[in-house]
Each structure stands twice: as C-alpha cells, then as structure tokens.
Image (cartoon, rainbow, N blue to C red):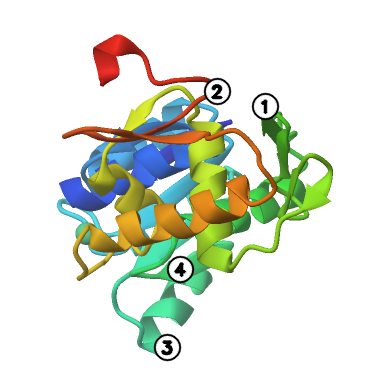
Amino acid sequence: MGILLVEDEPNVVSVIKRGLTTYGFEVSVAANGVTGLQMALDNNFDLVILDVMLPLMDGIQVCKRIREQKKTVPIIMLTALDSTENIVGGLDSGADDYMVKPFKIAELAARLRTLLRRSGAEIQANNSFAIDNLHIDTESKIAKRNNEVLKLTATEYRLLEYFIKNQRKVLSRIQILENVWDIDFNMGTNVVDVYVNYLRKKLEKNGGIKLIHTVFGMGYIMKEGDIDENTK
Ligand code: CA
C-alpha cells in the first residue's frame, strides 16, 4: 500500500510513519503543500494523508488541485483545528474523510483501511500473527494462548499486537509509548513498564513460556527462548 503523507511537523511525521509501517503500509512523505501536490499528481498513491496547515500551500488548496486533475485517489485530512468550519472546508474541497489531532495510530490505520476498501484497493496486510503458541487476529482483536482466549483490556491488546508484529526486535520504551498510546502523550514511560507487567502475567498465567523479555538499558523484546547474550 503506497501512502503519501503531507505533513510539516517532523514529530508527527515520524510517529505516523513508524506507526503505519507496523500496520503494513508503505509511507512516502512531503513536508509542504507544493511538494505534496506534485508528488500526488506524479505518482499513483493508493491514498493521501493531508495536513490542513502546511507551508507554501495549505491542505485545502492541495486537495482542490488534486481533484481538479480528476485524480480519484482517496484523501484523508488531518486537522488540529476541531472547528466545524475547517472540517466542512476540508470535505468541500474533495477530501473523503478527516481526523482531528491528536489521534491514535490504530484509529488512523482503521480509517485508511475503510477508505482503501471503498476505493477497491486490495490490502495485502496479514491479519494473523503468532509466536510460540500465542496467536492474535487483528481483525477480531482476539488473542489466544494454547487455544485459550486471553482476557485483555484494550491497551493490553494494543501492546500485545505491537509486540507480536515487531517480534525479535528490541523496542525502546519511547517507541512502545508512541505506538501504543496517543500521539500527544504527557505521561512518562513508567506506564509502559506497568502494562508490560500486566501483559506478562496474563500471557504466562497457565504456565506459558516467557515471551516478553527486558533488555537492560534498552527496552523490551518479544521472542521465544532466552534472551541472547548480546542483548543482555
Ligand atoms: Ca502542519
């Protein structure tokens, strides 16, 4: 899935890009309206994510220009201004949907999937992930260990999904925080440790082997077996 993200805020770009990549999307970035418009017209992206407040040309103008060229690519607008005026302006300019910042990456990914389905684009992203005897289905959001359904809270589920999609990679607490909690978070990384402990207890409740390991000074890793010497 080729997604064009037109956004000038480097922090927002990195969070969205990293987040959507874990959901199986391929993200290209333009940092201003003029470059964004050019890239949208010159390439066949499956979808465009367009910020409203952009340097050189605002998102509403970019959207109008794309539509003037009769491009039918799905467009989703990002706006920090939650006034109805801006939202209506965005939709009038030809956008298909909008999201008000801050938002959760999981919600953005869900909106993208809906738009892509509507536009007939195929989603090749896999829905099921596994490690050891743990399986999750990202459509039904059901996690099972040894064929028994795990009773997880929404946050624990998102944390587990992030771990399982990134298994065998060392994930820092900041990375986990950015991908599992809100874009615009005001909390410390302690919440990550707390939830990792909740999740571990549920995963290991019926004697399952340990899957989430602490990597001292770095973060966490989901893998089978003991932690490697080099990541101790
Ligand atoms: Ca902006």
Q: Which residue is mark 4?
A: 99
Alpha carbons under labels 1 and 4: distance apart: 37 Å
Secondary structure found at label 2: loop
Q: Residue at x 60, y 55 (%)?
A: 202
In the rendered image, the vertical position of residue 28 relative to residue 117, given as above or below: above
Does the beta carbon at disc 4 come under 8 Å from ligand 1?
no
Alpha carbons under labels 1 and 3: distance apart: 48 Å
Q: Which residue is mark 1?
A: 132
Q: Amino acid at mark 2?
A: Glu
Alpha carbons under labels 2 and 3: distance apart: 50 Å
CB-based contact (under 8 Å), mark 1 and mark 4? no
Q: Amino acid at mark 1?
A: Asp
Between residue 136 and residue 77, name the one nearer to us: 136
Q: Amino acid at mark 3?
A: Thr
Q: Quadrant of residue 81?
A: bottom left
CB-based contact (under 8 Å), mark 2 and mark 3? no
Q: Which residue is mark 3?
A: 84
How far from the left and from the top, in percent, is residue 29?
Answer: 32, 35
Does the beta carbon at disc 1 come under 8 Å from ligand 1?
no
Q: Residue at x 21, y 32 (%)?
A: 216
Alpha carbons under labels 2 and 4: distance apart: 38 Å
Q: Amino acid at mark 4?
A: Met
N-term mark: 1 or 3: 3
Q: Which residue is mark 2?
A: 224
Of circles 2 and 3, the one toward us is 2
